[in-house]
Amino acid sequence: MPINDLERKRFIKFALVGISGTIIDFGIFNLFLFFKFSSKFAYTISFVVAVFNNFFWNRNWTYPESKIHPVKTQLIKFSTVSVAGFLIRTNLYKLIELPSIKLTESLLTENIFLSSELIGKNISLAFVIIVVLLWNYFANRLLTYKDI
């Protein structure tokens, strides 16, 4: 996979799609937390919605040439990469969630509008999203969009 201008443009588009997915992910995650749903539920639903968003935009904007392939085939490949990313994300989130909350608690000396628990959970989510973004780009480039 040579790095050329077209590949750079695709990476930028993939990253922009990832940003939209991240906004959706954070928005849904925090909306469910606001309404007192469990973190696991909020985390799972926000991830699934973001994956469908990203698949749609990557197929139609980042890699429009890929539409020559059946959507079902691509969705299976994209979902496989995403599930692997979800496993990476889940295990990494579990590993860093509590330390992030404790760190936030130690740094916040006064009450602010947002709780240290909410801030710690969002810091954890931001970190795992960055890790999984890199995984998703390279894995999808090599599996879902390898012949583009």
Image (cartoon, helix red, strand yellow):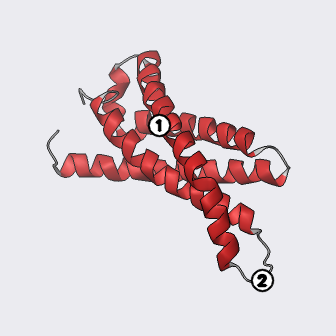
Quadrant containing the N terminus is top left
Question: Compared with residue 117, is residue 32 higher up or lower down, i.e. above or below?
Answer: above
Question: Compared with residue 120, is residue 8 higher up or lower down, i.e. above or below?
Answer: above
Q: Which mark is residue 85?
A: 1
Q: Mark 1 packing: few (<14 Cα in 10 Å), some, or many (20+)?
A: many
The amino acid sitting under disc 1 is Gly
Q: Residues at badges 2 and 1 in contact (C-beta under 8 Å)?
A: no
Circle 1 — which element? helix
Give how far across and how far down residue 30 sits, in percent.
Answer: 73, 54
Q: Name the residue under label 2.
A: 110
Alpha carbon distance from label 2 to label 1:
36 Å
Single out the mark in the foreground, 2 or 1.
Answer: 2
The amino acid sitting under disc 2 is Glu
Give how far across and how far down residue 61 sits, in percent.
Answer: 40, 40
Foreground residue, 83 or 6? 83
- Is residue 56 visible in the rendered image? The answer is no
Residue at (56, 34) in percent of width and height: 52
Quadrant containing the C terminus is top left
Residue at (65, 56) in percent of width and height: 98
